[in-house]
Image (cartoon, rainbow, N blue to C red):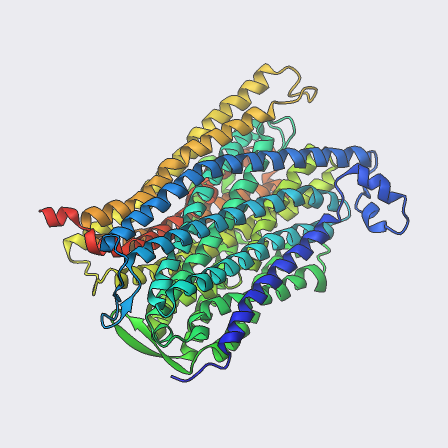
C-alpha cells in the first residue's frame, strides 16, 4: 500500500490554511469594491483632497447635464431599497425554514436512534462484524448535529452572497460611467467575494466538524463519516427552499413587470414607473445569488460526504490513513488556491477595455482554472495518496492506483468545462442557436416558443454524453469513490464558477439602477452588455450545478445501496421497476408545482401592476411614484406560501417510500429521478437562457440581422419578450431546483439508510 508523501500533520495544517487564505482573499476583494463611493457625504469630504483622486474619479460623468450628487443619491436610494427588500425576504424565509430545520433534526434523531432501540451499547460494525463500533444512538446525535451545521452554513452562505451583491450593484452602475472595463472589474470582484467566502467556509466548517467528531469516535471512522453525511443533507435542504422560494419570488416579479410594463405599456425594462421594478431587482439577489450559493454549497458538501463515506470503509479508513482519507478536502483546498490565481487574470493581469472582450474574459476564467487545476490535482494525487490502495466496491475491495484516481478527478473537471461551453453555445447570442430563435420571432411568439423548446431538448445531448463518459471512466477505475471524486473535480473550481455566476445578477441589478436613476443611454448600453454576458455565465453556472448533481447523486446512490445492504439493484423485479417509474415521474411533478407557483404569483403581480397603472394619476407620465412596497409584499407572501408543497414533495418521498416499500423500491425511485431529472433540468435551463438572450440580441441591435428584428417595441421584440417570460420560470425556478431534488433525495436516503434497512418495507412485511 505504501505511505503518503504529505504527512498527517501537513494535511491538518494545509486544509485550514487554504480555507483561511480564501476568506482573506474575499475580504481583500470586498475592501477594493468598497472604495467606490455611493454617498455624496463621503464624496464632498474626499473630493477636496487632491491626493484622493481615486474616490472623486468614480463620480466623473461622461454625459453633460446630469448632476453628480443627484445621480449618486438616487443610486444609493435604489440600492438601499433593493437591499432592504432582499434582507426582509430572506429573514422571513429563514424563519419558516428554521422551524423545518428543528422539526427535521428531531426526526433524524428519533429515526436513527430507534435502529438499536436507543441503546448506548457498542454494536458490531456494518461492514466488518468482527469489530465493534459506536452505538446507533451516537450516529443519531452526531447526524443531527451535522445536519444543523450544514443547514446553518448553507443559510449563511446564501445570506452573505445576497448582502455582497446588493452592496456591489450601485457601485457597478457608478463605475460604468468611467467605462465598461471599470464596471466589469467591480462586478467580477464582488462575485469573487461570494465565490471564495462560500468555498472556504464550506471547507473550513466540514474540516472542523470532522476533527471535533473524531474526539468522540476515535478509531471508528466508519461511524464518524456516516454521521458527517448529515452535513450534506442540511446543506441541500436549505438550498432547496432557497432555490424554490427565491426562484418563485424573482420570476413572479419579473413576469409581472415584463407582461404589463414591456408588452402592454411599451415602457423600457427597469423603468422606474413600473411598480414591480424593485421586486424584480430584489428577486435577482434572493433567487440567483442566495439560491445559487446555497445550491452549489449543497453540491460541494454532498460530494465531499459521499467520497468520505466510501473512503471510510476502504483501505484509507480501515488502516486509518488520515491524509489519504481527507484527499477530497485536499482537492478542494488546492482548488481555492488555483481559483485565487485565476481571478487575478481577470482583475489584475488583463484589462477589459471593450464590450466584445467581456464574454471572452469570463470564458478564459473557466479555461485557465481548469488547466491550472489539472496540475493541482496531479500534485495532490502524488503527495496525498499511496501508490496503490483499495476502494470499497459493493462488498469487495477493489485495488486502485493513485494515477487512476487522478484521472477520475480530472475527467470530472474537464467534463464540467465541456458542459460549460456547450451551455454557452446554446444560450449565448453570439452563436447561431440563439440567433435562430431570435429570427423565429419574425412570425410571432408561437414560432419563438417552438424554436426555443427544440433548442433546449437538443442542448441535452452533449452534456449527457460528457456525464456518461465521466461515469464510465471514474467507475471503471475506482468504483463509486471514483464517481464521488469526479463530482468533486467538477466542483473543484467552485470559487471561480460562483464568481462568474454571481457577476450576472450584479450586472443585471446595475442596469436596473442605471435605468431607475435616469442615467444616460450610453451607461445603460454598457450595463446591458455586462448583463448579456452575465446571462450566459449564469447559464454556465447552472450547467455546472446540474452536471455535478448527476455525479453527486450517483455517488450517494452507491453509498446508499452499500449502507442498506443491497447486493444488486435488479430493474426486472417489480419492487425496483415501480420505483423507477415513480422516480422518473417526480421531476415532472416537481416542475409542475414550481411552474404553477410562479404562474399563480405572477397573476397576482400582473393584477397589482395593472391596478396601479390604471388608478394612480400621473404614473405613466412619471409625475407620480408607484407603490413598490405592495409588489415586494406580493412576491414575498407568494414565494413563502408556494415553496412549501414542492419542498415537502422532495423531503417526504424518500421517507414514505423507504418506510412503506423498503430500500429496494427506494433505490428504483432514486435511479429514476436521477435519469429523468438531469435531462429536464438541462433542457429547462438552456431553453430559458436562450429565450432571454434572444430578446437581448434584438434589443442590443449590435448586428445587421438584429437591427432588422428591432427596435424595442417592434412585433418581433414583443414576441421575444413573451418567449423570455415563458422561459423565466424554466431557467430560474424549475430547472435549477431539479438538481437539488435529485441530490437531496439521494443524501436523505443515505442518512436514513440504517432505519430503512432495519424497519422499512412495512407494506411488503404485512402482505
Whole-percent x, y for residue 621 in the image = 68, 20
- Looking at the image, the residue that sits furthest to the left is 767
* Percent x, y of residue 525: 69, 43
Residue under the image location 30 percent in, 43 percent down: 652
Q: Residue at x 36, y 68 (%)?
A: 221
Looking at this view, name the residue that lies furthest to the bottom: 2
**Where, quadrant-wise, is the N terminus in this rendering?**
bottom left
Say above or below: 686 vs 485: above
Residue 414 picture location, percent across and down: 48, 67
How many marks the image carries: the answer is 0
**Is residue 182 positioned above or below 257 on the image?**
below
Tell me: 682 left or right of 112: right
Task: Name the residue at 44% across, 40% down.
Answer: 98
Q: Is residue 72 visible?
A: yes
Q: Name above or below for residue 252 compared with residue 608.
A: below
Question: Taking 343 as reference, is 658 left or right?
Answer: left
Q: Is residue 244 left or right of residue 285?
A: left
Q: Nearer the viewer, residue 398 or 424?
A: 398
**Is 282 or 263 nearer to us in this picture?**
282
For image coordinates 48% across by 48% down, the residue present is 152
- Return the x and y of residue 365 as percentages of the image width and height: 60, 62
**Quick one: 191 or 534, which is closer to the camera?**
191
When asked about the image quadrant of residue 462, the answer is: bottom left
Amino acid at each position: 500500500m505504501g505511505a503518503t508523501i504529505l504527512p498527517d500533520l501537513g494535511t491538518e495544517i494545509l486544509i485550514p490554511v487554504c480555507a483561511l487564505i480564501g476568506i482573506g482573499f474575499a475580504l481583500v476583494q470586498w475592501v477594493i469594491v468598497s472604495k467606490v463611493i455611493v454617498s455624496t457625504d463621503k464624496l464632498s469630504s474626499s473630493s477636496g483632497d487632491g491626493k484622493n483622486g481615486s474616490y472623486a474619479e468614480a463620480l466623473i460623468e461622461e454625459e453633460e447635464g446630469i448632476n453628480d450628487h443627484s445621480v449618486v443619491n438616487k443610486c444609493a436610494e435604489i440600492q438601499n431599497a433593493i437591499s432592504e427588500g432582499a434582507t426582509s425576504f430572506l429573514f422571513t424565509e429563514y424563519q419558516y425554514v428554521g422551524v423545518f430545520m428543528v422539526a427535521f433534526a428531531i426526526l433524524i434523531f428519533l429515526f436513527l436512534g430507534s435502529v438499536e432501540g436507543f441503546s448506548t451499547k457498542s454494536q458490531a460494525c456494518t461492514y466488518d462484524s468482527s469489530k465493534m463500533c459506536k452505538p446507533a444512538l451516537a450516529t443519531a446525535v452526531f447526524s443531527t448535529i451535522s445536519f444543523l451545521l450544514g443547514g446553518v452554513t448553507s443559510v449563511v452562505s446564501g445570506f452573505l452572497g445576497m448582502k455582497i451583491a446588493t452592496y456591489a450593484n450601485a457601485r457597478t452602475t457608478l463605475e460604468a460611467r468611467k467605462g465598461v472595463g471599470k464596471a466589469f472589474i467591480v462586478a467580477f470582484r464582488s462575485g469573487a467575494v461570494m465565490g471564495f467566502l462560500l468555498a472556504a467556509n464550506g471547507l473550513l466548517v466540514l474540516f472542523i466538524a470532522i476533527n471535533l467528531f473524531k474526539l468522540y469516535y476515535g478509531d471508528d471512522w466508519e461511524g464518524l463519516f456516516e454521521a458527517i453525511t448529515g452535513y450534506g443533507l442540511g446543506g441541500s435542504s436549505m438550498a432547496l427552499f432557497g432555490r424554490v422560494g427565491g426562484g418563485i419570488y424573482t420570476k413572479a416579479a419579473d413576469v409581472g413587470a415584463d407582461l404589463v410594463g414591456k408588452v402592454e405599456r411599451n415602457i423600457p425594462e427597469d423603468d422606474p414607473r413600473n411598480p414591480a421594478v424593485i421586486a424584480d431587482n430584489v428577486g435577482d439577489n434572493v433567487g440567483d445569488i442566495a439560491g445559487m450559493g446555497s445550491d452549489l454549497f449543497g453540491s460541494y458538501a454532498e460530494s465531499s460526504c459521499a467520497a468520505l463515506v466510501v473512503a471510510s470503509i476502504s483501505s484509507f479508513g480501515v488502516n486509518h490513513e488520515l491524509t489519504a482519507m481527507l484527499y477530497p478536502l485536499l482537492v478542494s483546498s488546492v482548488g481555492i488556491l488555483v481559483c485565487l490565481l485565476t481571478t487575478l487574470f481577470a482583475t489584475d493581469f488583463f484589462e477589459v477595455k471593450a464590450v466584445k472582450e467581456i464574454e471572452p474574459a469570463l470564458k478564459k476564467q473557466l479555461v485557465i482554472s481548469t488547466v491550472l487545476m489539472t496540475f493541482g490535482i496531479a500534485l495532490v494525487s502524488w503527495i496525498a495518496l499511496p501508490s496503490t490502495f483499495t476502494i470499497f466496491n459493493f462488498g469487495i475491495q477493489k485495488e486502485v492506483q493513485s494515477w487512476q484516481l487522478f484521472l477520475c478527478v480530472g475527467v470530472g473537471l474537464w467534463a464540467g468545462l465541456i458542459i460549460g461551453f456547450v451551455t454557452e453555445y446554446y444560450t449565448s447570442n453570439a452563436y447561431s442557436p440563439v440567433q435562430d430563435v431570435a429570427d423565429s420571432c419574425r412570425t410571432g411568439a408561437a414560432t419563438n416558443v417552438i424554436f426555443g423548446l427544440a433548442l433546449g431538448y437538443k442542448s441535452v445531448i452533449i452534456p449527457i454524453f460528457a456525464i456518461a463518459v465521466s461515469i464510465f471512466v471514474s467507475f471503471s477505475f475506482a468504483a463509486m469513490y471514483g464517481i464521488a471524486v469526479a463530482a468533486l473535480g467538477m466542483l473543484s473550481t467552485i470559487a471561480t464558477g460562483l464568481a462568474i455566476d454571481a457577476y450576472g445578477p450584479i450586472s443585471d441589478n446595475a442596469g436596473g439602477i442605471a435605468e431607475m436613476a435616469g442615467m444616460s443611454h450610453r451607461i445603460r448600453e454598457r450595463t446591458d452588455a455586462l448583463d448579456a454576458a452575465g446571462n450566459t455565465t449564469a447559464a454556465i453556472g447552472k450547467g455546472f450545478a446540474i452536471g455535478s448533481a448527476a455525479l453527486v447523486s450517483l455517488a450517494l446512490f452507491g453509498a446508499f445501496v452499500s449502507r442498506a445492504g443491497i447486493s444488486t439493484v435488479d430493474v426486472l423485479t417489480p419492487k425496483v421497476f415501480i420505483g423507477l417509474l415513480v422516480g422518473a415521474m417526480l421531476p415532472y411533478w416537481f416542475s409542475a408545482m414550481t411552474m404553477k407557483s410562479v404562474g399563480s404569483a405572477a397573476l397576482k403581480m400582473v393584477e397589482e401592476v395593472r391596478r396601479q397603472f390604471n388608478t394612480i394619476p400621473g404614473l405613466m407620465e412619471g409625475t407620480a411614484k408607484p407603490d413598490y412596497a405592495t409588489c415586494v409584499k406580493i412576491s414575498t407572501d407568494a414565494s413563502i406560501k408556494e415553496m412549501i408543497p414542492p419542498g415537502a414533495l422532495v423531503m417526504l418521498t424518500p421517507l414514505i417510500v423507504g418506510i412503506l416499500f423498503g430500500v429496494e423500491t427506494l433505490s428504483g425511485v432514486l435511479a429514476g429521478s436521477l435519469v429523468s431529472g438531469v435531462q429536464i433540468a438541462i433542457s429547462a435551463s438552456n431553453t430559458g437562457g436562450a429565450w432571454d438572450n434572444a430578446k437581448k440580441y434584438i434589443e442590443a441591435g449590435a448586428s445587421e440581422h438584429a437591427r432588422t428584428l428591432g427596435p424595442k417595441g417592434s412585433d418581433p421584440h414583443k414576441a421575444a419578450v413573451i418567449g423570455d417570460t415563458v422561459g423565466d420560470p424554466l431557467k430560474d425556478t424549475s430547472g435549477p431546483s431539479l438538481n437539488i431534488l435529485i441530490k437531496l433525495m439521494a443524501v436523505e436516503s443515505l442518512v436514513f439508510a440504517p432505519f430503512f434497512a432495519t424497519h422499512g418495507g412495512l407494506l411488503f412485511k404485512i402482505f
